[in-house]
């Protein structure tokens, strides 16, 4: 395996993966990305021209995808519409990219016999009660709640069907909530950090009791590389780093780390159908493939992420006002 095609590589997790691959392997990487509002070429600044190439285009463009698969030994598929709140406002792009786009890639993988890794989310499993001792495993039944998570669930099922029916050489990973550099300011942690920098009070949906299981994006990248190298074809692997925190705890940590009173936030209108809790049991990935997260301390990873946003206002400022205006129009 020498040449990787990475879809969605100008987005948050995809760009972190590309940097991780360039820094830790000798692979060549081509990114295919449509550069929607969520894609940012600046996230790929500084990559070596002899090992990295960028192609702007849509994963649902069958002719373009076919030409790129011809040059790839393996494909890692990150491209998606990724924000739950947007999917409640306008679901259509989620169907076009997450379902039809994934179908288009799978057909190319089938034609070319290309190794394919599909990136997905723990949200396909629905949510857990706060006091449920169980966590999601690879055998938890699918039960998605939002237009976003239902299209991700649909894309996972397409991958499974293409493996079984057509022998496509694919693996799937379902990861918990990521944090780290290059995350769009629409998402929870960057929104609150950049609010504090701008003198705006952080916004907590509802009571803020909802729990997310946080993992640093670089740990997600090392897990995906591990699965690409050693994962068993047809298998699903859950990726998580035992990082459960309530949203209220996270906002308080951000405020404290940024020198503000811990209660200097507002409660705003809750998200419709808001999942209560996600929690990942990543035993299979750890025991079968020997993967371990490097960021075991969420507080220090969060501190480094705050520092990154303080140092990179030129990266996030262009999207900030429009994002806040959209939230304000919804009372959030
Ligand atoms: P993101 O929104 O930051 O980035 C998505 C990227 O895909 C953008 O660069 C965008 O331009 C590109 N894109 C969108 N539609 C496209 C299309 N039709 N053709 C080509 N490119 C297109 O998303 P993210 O947070 O980096 O998520 C990446 C993947 O990881 C998604 O599949 C998501 O479901 C999954 N995931 C995300 C998280 C998380 O916490 N953010 C957790 C688990 C899984
Ligand atoms: O301003 C906010 N206030 C708030 O309380 C925002 C933007 C969010 N929230 C809450 C909603 C969630 O409980 O914070 C939590 C995290 O919200 P998001 O960042 O929107 O993430 P989430 O909906 O949990 O989904 C994320 O993780 C799983 C990614 O966006 C998905 O792509 C991934 O599949």
Image: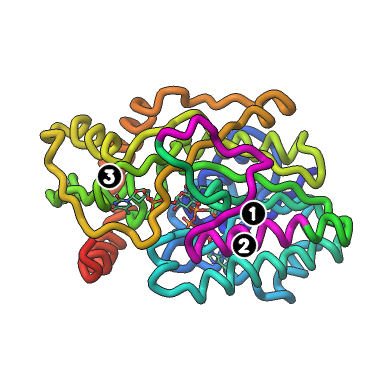
Does residue 53 lie above or below 138 as drawn?
below
In three-dimensional space, the C-alpha distance between marks 2 and 1, rounded to whole angstroms, equals: 6 Å
Q: Give the residue displayed 80% in from the left and 43% down from the top.
A: 1
In the image, residue 23 above or below residue 201 = above
Q: Which quadrant, please, contains the C terminus?
A: bottom left
Q: Is residue 136 magenta?
A: yes
For residue 311, say whether it is visible. Answer: no
Q: Residue at x 50, y 62 (%)?
A: 148
Is the residue at mark 2 in contact range of ligand 1, meaning its CB lies under 8 Å from it? yes
Q: Which residue is mark 3?
A: 208
Query: Tag 2, which secondary structure?
Result: strand
Mark 3 vs ligand 2: CB under 8 Å?
yes
Packing grade of label 3 (10 A; few <14, some 14-19, many >=20) is some
List the residue tagged with mark 2: 32
The location of residue 99, given as percent across then percent down, is 63, 68
Q: Quadrant of the rendered structure where residue 214 is?
A: top left
- Quadrant of the rendered image containing residue 151: bottom right
The residue under the point 22% across, 30% down is 257
Image location of residue 280, percent across then percent down: 54, 36
Determine which residue is flagged by label 1: 6
Q: Are marks 2 and 1 in contact (CB under 8 Å)?
A: yes
**Marks 2 and 3, how far apart in space?**
36 Å
User: What span is in magenta?
Assistant: 131-160
Which residue is more in the foreground, 19 or 270? 270
Q: Is residue 32 magenta?
A: no
């Amino acid at each position: 395996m020498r040449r990787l095609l990475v879809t969605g590589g100008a987005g948050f997790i995809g760009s972190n993966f590309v940097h991780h691959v360039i820094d830790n392997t000798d692979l060549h990487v081509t990114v295919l990305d449509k550069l929607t509002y969520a894609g940012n070429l600046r996230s790929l600044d500084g990559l070596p021209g002899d090992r990295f190439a960028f192609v702007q285009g849509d994963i649902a463009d069958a002719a373009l995808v076919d030409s790129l698969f011809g040059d790839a030994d393996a494909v890692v598929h990150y491209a998606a519409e990724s924000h739950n709140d947007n999917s409640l406002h306008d679901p259509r792009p989620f169907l076009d990219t997450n379902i039809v786009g994934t179908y288009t890639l799978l057909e190319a993988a089938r034609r070319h016999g290309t190794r394919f890794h599909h990136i997905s989310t723990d949200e396909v499993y629905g949510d857990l009660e706060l006091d449920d001792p169980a966590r999601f495993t690879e055998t938890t039944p699918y039960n998605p709640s939002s237009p976003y998570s239902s299209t991700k669930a649909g894309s996972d099922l397409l991958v499974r069907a293409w493996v079984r029916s057509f022998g496509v050489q694919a693996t799937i990973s379902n990861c918990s909530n990521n944090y780290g550099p290059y995350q769009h300011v629409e998402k929870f942690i960057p929104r609150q950090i950049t609010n504090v920098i701008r003198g705006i009070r952080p916004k907590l949906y509802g009571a803020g009791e909802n729990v997310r299981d946080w993992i640093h994006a670089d740990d997600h990248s090392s897990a995906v590389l591990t699965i690409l190298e050693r994962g068993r074809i047809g298998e699903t692997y859950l990726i998580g780093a035992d990082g459960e925190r309530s949203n209220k705890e996270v906002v308080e940590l951000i405020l404290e780390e940024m020198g503000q009173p811990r209660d200097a936030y507002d409660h705003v209108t809750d998200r419709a159908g808001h999942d209560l809790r996600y929690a990942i049991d990543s035993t299979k990935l750890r025991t079968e493939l020997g993967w371990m997260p490097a960021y075991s301390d969420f507080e220090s990873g969060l501190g480094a992420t705050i520092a990154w946003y303080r140092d990179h206002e030129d990266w996030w400022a262009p999207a900030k006002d429009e994002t806040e205006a959209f939230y304000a129009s919804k009372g959030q």
